[in-house]
Image (cartoon, rainbow, N blue to C red):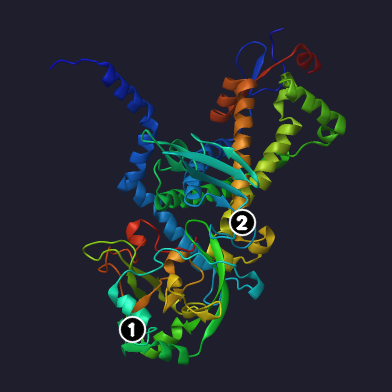
């Protein structure tokens, strides 16, 4: 069985069909998004380090008795420092990574370690400059993507699950398949599976917009312009906390996303996001059915 | 020239390679060309906010119940000078606010003069650039009324606030705190020269006898211990030339975000 009989745009090897999966707009905005989110994360952690406490409500500061429910601090421990991460009443010793880590060979107090912040040393002004530059870049890039997704029908064609993809039986089957790292093959791999679609939609329509909106809620200027943002998120400090949680969700998503890319055919996935072409390994039944 | 790869040299070499990415990032951070591009975002932020806000767009005002139980004193909390110590001793009776520069009538206003003018009371949130916030009740005279009294000379574009405190101890006085805002913020109804906080006279830790409130911007714009207001067409020749103590140290002049 070597011939390809499906309506493919090109053929690579016998039994394989290359099809055009990712449009230029999706590929370009995807990689620009990688760039933006990387710098936003690293500069964001630099900004967080200036005040490593999170609160809920309209206000919150490290002046007692303002309660922070998450903090990443350092305490003196003999002649050395100990990193302490606190979530509510739970305190964890996180020396080396959170609260206290090594910078220039010396252990010192720092919420997030120097290898993940930009710049590596403590410099809030520079962190902010990078953050807001890439925030604008990210917003413009995101708007281009959203506009393309709507006009170019990318959302409807690629991201919105079909009705039969959403049946409980089908979803349960996909969860079971994912858990065993068993991925669709052949014609079934032509479209995203429903877990993939739902995850991408949650990131595109919920988590990333949440980052922008909670970011704007921290700005005194945008607060005056959109005062309803304060009511939506329950205050500037709540928004700051949600901003942090949403950023963590993006990191989690990226980890899972990269793992999935690795285990479901790394080169094929990577090529498709660079050239646009994705190879389908046709199974006998695909060809028979055509 | 001989080249010997000693163990020490090797260790240095590999640690340099390991931190190559980091130092690469830091080199990029310190490049002027890169910074010039990144700084464009400040103009974009200011342009966007100014486009979306009008002269009358107010910062959120809160209720008495929302006031923070403790308002953190930040930056200078006790100016370290004999002049200031003398002023606090006689409860700022001899203190005068100097309004000069590009004005028609330079002013010398005592605290009593300012308190005799119409006042505005507002409960607003103070946002520190570091990330914390506190809500307080401020009472003071709208800056616009003081500027009206002085009368602006044609060409005046910025109000520069000269303060009594040195946030950084230097020999040449370059650690003296100052700030500046443009006339859009200067005329804004919530921009006040506050002499009262939470129903009492402004405390030393919060900038006694007078501090600026410019509610649509971050905390470092809210100059404390204000001694003088100078109207200028440019702040290029004042201190570091960037319009403020923190601006001279890399922070944005427009602190609306």
- Where residue A59 sits, quadrant-wise, is bottom right
Q: Dot 2 falls on which chain?
A: A
Question: Residue sitting at 34 percent across and 57 percent down?
Answer: B249
The residue that mark 2 highlights is A67
Camera-side residue of A118 and B169: B169
How far apart in space, not on screen, are marks 1 and 2 (Cα)? 42 Å
Identify whether A190 is placed above or below B191.
above
The x and y percentages for residue A220 are 53, 64
Whether residue A174 is visible to the viewer of this picture, yes or no, is yes
The x and y percentages for residue B150 are 36, 88
Tell me the quarter of the image containing the C terminus of chain A. Answer: top right
Residue B31: give its label.
none
Query: Which residue ends up furthest to the front in the rendered image?
Result: A78
Question: Residue sitting at 34 percent across and 73 percent down?
Answer: B163
Q: Residues within 10 Å of mark 1 (few under 14, many from 20)?
A: many
Does dot 2 land on a helix, a strand or a loop? Answer: loop
Identify whether A224 is placed above or below A233.
below
Q: Dot 1 falls on which chain?
A: B
């Amino acid at each position: 069985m070597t011939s390809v009989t499906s309506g493919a745009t090109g053929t690579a090897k016998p039994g394989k069909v290359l099809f055009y999966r990712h449009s230029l707009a999706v590929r370009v905005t995807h990689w620009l998004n990688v760039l933006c989110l990387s710098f936003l994360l690293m500069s964001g952690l630099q900004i967080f380090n200036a005040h490593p406490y999170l609160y809920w409500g309209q206000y919150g500061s490290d002046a007692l008795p303002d309660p922070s429910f998450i903090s990443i601090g350092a305490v003196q421990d003999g002649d050395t420092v100990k990193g302490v991460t606190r979530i509510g009443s739970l305190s964890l010793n996180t020396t080396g990574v959170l609260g206290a880590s090594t910078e220039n060979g010396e252990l010192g107090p720092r919420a997030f370690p120097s290898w993940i912040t930009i710049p590596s040393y403590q410099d809030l002004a520079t962190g902010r400059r990078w953050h807001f530059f890439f925030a604008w870049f990210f917003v413009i890039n995101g708007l281009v993507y959203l506009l393309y997704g709507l006009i170019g029908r990318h959302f409807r064609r690629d991201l919105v699950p079909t009705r039969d993809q959403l049946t409980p039986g089908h979803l349960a089957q996909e969860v079971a398949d994912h858990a065993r790292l068993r991925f669709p093959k052949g014609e079934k791999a032509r479209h995203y599976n429903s877990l993939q679609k739902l995850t991408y939609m949650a990131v595109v329509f919920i988590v990333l917009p949440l980052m922008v909106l909670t970011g704007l809620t921290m700005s005194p200027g945008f607060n005056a312009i959109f005062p309803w943002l304060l009511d939506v998120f329950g205050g500037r400090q709540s928004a700051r906390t949600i901003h942090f949680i949403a950023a963590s969700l993006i990191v989690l998503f990226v980890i899972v996303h990269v793992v999935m890319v690795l285990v479901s055919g790394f080169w094929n996935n990577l090529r498709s996001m660079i050239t646009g072409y994705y190879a389908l390994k046709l199974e006998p039944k695909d060809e028979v059915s055509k | 020239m001989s080249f010997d790869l000693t163990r020490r040299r090797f260790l240095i070499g590999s640690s340099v390679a390991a931190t190559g990415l980091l130092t690469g990032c830091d080199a990029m951070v310190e490049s002027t060309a890169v910074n010039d591009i990144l700084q464009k975002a400040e103009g974009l932020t200011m342009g966007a906010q100014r486009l979306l806000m009008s002269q009358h767009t107010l910062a959120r005002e809160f209720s008495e119940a929302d006031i923070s139980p403790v308002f953190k004193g930040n930056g200078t909390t006790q100016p370290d000078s004999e002049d200031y110590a003398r002023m606090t001793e006689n409860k700022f009776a001899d203190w005068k606010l100097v309004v000069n520069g590009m004005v028609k009538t330079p002013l010398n206003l005592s605290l009593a003069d300012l308190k005799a003018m119409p006042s505005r009371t507002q409960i607003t949130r103070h946002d520190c650039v570091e990330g914390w916030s506190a809500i307080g009740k401020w009472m003071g005279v709208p800056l616009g009324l003081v500027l009206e009294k002085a009368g602006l000379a044609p060409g005046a574009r910025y109000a520069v606030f000269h303060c009594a405190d040195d946030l950084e101890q230097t020999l040449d006085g370059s650690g003296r705190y100052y700030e500046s805002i443009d006339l859009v913020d200067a005329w804004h109804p919530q921009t006040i020269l506050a002499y009262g906080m939470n129903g009492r006279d402004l405390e030393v830790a919060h900038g006694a006898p007078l501090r600026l409130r410019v509610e649509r911007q971050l905390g470092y714009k809210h100059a404390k211990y204000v001694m003088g207001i100078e109207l200028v067409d440019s702040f290029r020749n004042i201190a570091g030339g960037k319009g403020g103590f923190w601006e001279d140290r890399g922070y944005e002049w427009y602190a609306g975000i």
